[in-house]
Image (cartoon, rainbow, N blue to C red):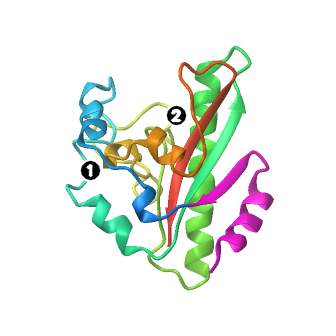
Amino acid sequence: MTISDLYDKIEEFNKDITIHPIQANQIIFEHRVALNCFYCSKYNTKWSCPPRIPQLNYQEIINEYENRAIVLISLAINNNFEEIRNKSTIILHHCLLMLEQYLWDNNNSLSLSFIGGSCKLCKNGCSELKCMNKGLSRIPLEALGINVINTLQNININIKFPIIDNLTRCGLILW
């Protein structure tokens, strides 16, 4: 399965989404990024975020894959940041799940993805008892300790803060 196969699948799914191959050594891991999760207002409330995620060596896991790609969505804010923030997360999340399924259907049973930002599949937030979307929720890149901004710079994509006109969100697909 090549990246061009995934380009075609994404084109069918949503024209606002792009895919960019990335090498393992271009993904920047930093402990300070993962530490920022501790200061998030959602800390210990999301089932796919710290401290509820498995304590694994995510850099090593990503290195085990032969193929990696950054999946991006960029949407105009139009004075409605919160709505676009949620919408972009959900669209990207569904795209990554669709890509995983496509890869699974094409003999890539270990395909895996990570989202940008916290999971927003549950409209009313996470249940206190358990994840209500266990098979669908995904861990955020930031929770793995990935410096998303520096990683994207390594593939010539520049994200600037503060966010003014467009919100760009990214995920990672592995196969």
Give the camera-side residue of 103 and 156.
Answer: 156
Q: Residue 33, relative to residue 4: is it above or below? A: above
Q: What element carries label 2?
A: loop
Q: Label 1 amino acid?
A: Ile
**N-terminal label among 1 and 2:** 1
Quarter holding residue 126: top left
Residue name at image x 56 percent, y 52 percent:
155
Q: Label 2 amino acid?
A: Lys
Residue name at image x 76 percent, y 51 percent:
14
Per the image, is 25 magenta?
no
* Whether residue 118 is visible: yes
The picture places residue 165, in percent across and down from the top left corner, at 70, 21
> Which quarter of the rendered picture does the N terminus lie within?
bottom right
Give the crowd class for mark 1: few <14, some 14-19, many >=20 residues within 10 Å. some
Residue 53, numbered label: 1
Per the image, is 6 magenta?
yes
Q: Residue 40, relative to residue 130: is it above or below? A: above
The picture places residue 63, in percent across and down from the top left corner, at 36, 69
| Left or right, 46 with reference to 100 | left
Q: Is mark 1 on a helix, strand or loop?
A: loop
Give the camera-side residue of 110 and 153.
Answer: 153
What's the magenta region? 1-21
Quarter holding residue 101: bottom right
Nearer the observer: mark 1 or 2; the answer is 1
